Image (spheres, rainbow, N blue to C red):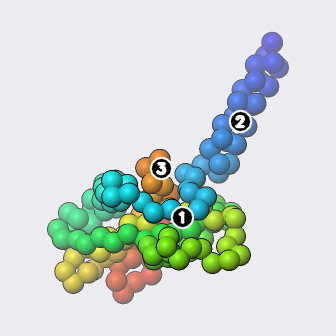
Amino acid sequence: MKKWLLLLVLGLLVASVLLTGGCGHPKGLADLRPLTDVEKDNVIEIALNTSAAVEANQTYGVYTTKLRWVGIYWFKGKAVLWEMGYDTVENGLPEGTSEEFQFYAQVVIDFGEPPQEEIRVAVNPDTGKVANITRYMFGTAPTTE
């Protein structure tokens, strides 16, 4: 009985890992598509409500946002980022783009006037899940959360 229960638990664990993408990272879009105005507003709101953005907003009190795309390839637990302008949707991905990339809307938030810090938040517009946050303090190297 114990052996059967152990096999069942292990089987469920393997199934859950496979269903969540294997390494726990939120899945992205398979390809780029135009976002509706509602989706744009939603991903911006999600990005502004991350702990990094809330903290920066408390420090600087002023921010601007812009929307871009980012392709993320997960390699050995690290995110390899390919950042693109939003107009990539109209132009299409370059031929030969690796199928390993997952695509996310990327909200770029500049804090301060003039900008002192930039936070880039990758969000799956279909699920609302945050895949990656990168912080840049102008004049220093970026950090990834």
Q: Nearer the viewer, residue 85 or 76?
A: 85
**Residue 59 picture location, percent across and down:** 21, 68
Query: Residue drawn 30% across and 70% down?
Result: 65
- Residues at marks 2 and 1, CA–CA distance in whole angstroms: 28 Å
Whether pointer 2 and pointer 1 mark residues with C-beta atoms closer than 8 Å, the reply is: no
Residue extending furthest left? 61
Residue extending furthest front? 90
Res. 32 mark: 1
Badge 2 density bin: few <14, some 14–19, many ≥20, Cα 10 Å:
few
Q: Is residue 95 left or right of residue 34?
A: right
Mark 2 lies on residue: 15
Mark 3 lies on residue: 126
- Amino acid at pointer 1: Leu
Q: Is residue 123 left or right of residue 94?
A: left
Secondary element type, mark 3: loop
Q: Nearer the viewer, residue 76 or 32?
A: 32
Query: Residue drawn 21% across and 84% down?
Result: 114
**Residue 128 picture location, percent across and down:** 43, 49
